[in-house]
Amino acid sequence: MRTRDTNKEEIVKQKAIEMLVAQGVEGFGMNRLAKECGISVATLYIYYSDKEDMIRKIGAEIGKNFFDEMLVGFSSEMSFVDGLRKQWENRSKFEIIFSLQATCFELLKHSTYGDAILSEISSDFKDEMTKFITKAIEKKELVPMTFEVFWSIAYGSLYSLLELHREGKSMSGKPFAFTTEIKEEAFNLVLKALTP
């Protein structure tokens, strides 16, 4: 039996992420991946049992990294303003630094693999955010609302601006960059919508 080569495994993962983003889940194939990596198809099966196993494992790894990063410097004990600001900082940092992985995770999260990938990820993030939101409502720092409405107001504009940043242009076609000034302007408007 052949042994695992961690360097080769990282190359395979990176190339798989690139291909998933470029071609989507339906266009992704093990034969094409092996060719892009310059390895045999048999080598892929040292690391993954099949295409589905590969997609689930890669998606779960990216998701774990994302949710771990969201908890850096964050606590459910923070004030609502400070906690939301930290979430914006963590989310924008991850999306900008790990743009390809973030795009891949979004694609996989909304695919037929989404539920399987999310079920493999620790619930620490979800638990911490639930406590944070509940405490903010109890302390009257946050207007009571359903989770879905909260999420769309709290993060919808952030992700729209990050998408424009990734594309490098605004909806009108003008050059666009996600600057500190733009982040603060959007954040302050979000706070007005969410706080009493």
Image (cartoon, rainbow, N blue to C red):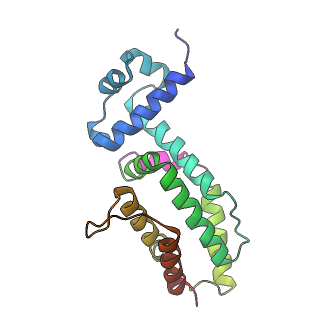
Q: Residue at x 41, y 46 (%)?
A: 104
Residue 195 relative to residue 13: left or right: right
Which picture quadrant has residue 86? Answer: bottom right
Front residue of this view, candidates 7 and 48: 7
**Which residue is most to the front?**
175
Q: Is 121 placed above or below 14 here?
A: below
Residue 9, given in percent of the width and then of the height, sits at 50, 25
Magenta segment: 112-122
Front residue of this view, candidates 185 and 94: 185
- Is 164 included in the stretch rendered in magenta? no
Front residue of this view, candidates 68 and 53: 68
Q: Residue at x 26, y 37 (%)?
A: 27
Q: Residue at x 30, y 35 (%)?
A: 28
Residue 11, given in percent of the width and then of the height, sits at 47, 28
All told, the count of numbered labels is 0
Q: Is residue 106 visible?
A: yes
User: Where does the C terminus fall, quadrant-wise?
Assistant: bottom right
Residue 55, given in percent of the width and then of the height, sits at 42, 37
Q: Is 147 placed above or below 58 here?
A: below
Residue 123 relative to residue 37: left or right: right
**Which residue is most to the right?**
77
Front residue of this view, candidates 86 and 178: 178
**Which residue is most to the top?**
1
Q: Is 78 placed above or below 67 here?
A: below
Q: Is 36 placed above or below 126 here?
A: above
Residue 141, given in percent of the width and then of the height, sits at 64, 84
Q: Is residue 146 visible?
A: no
Which picture quadrant has residue 12? Answer: top left
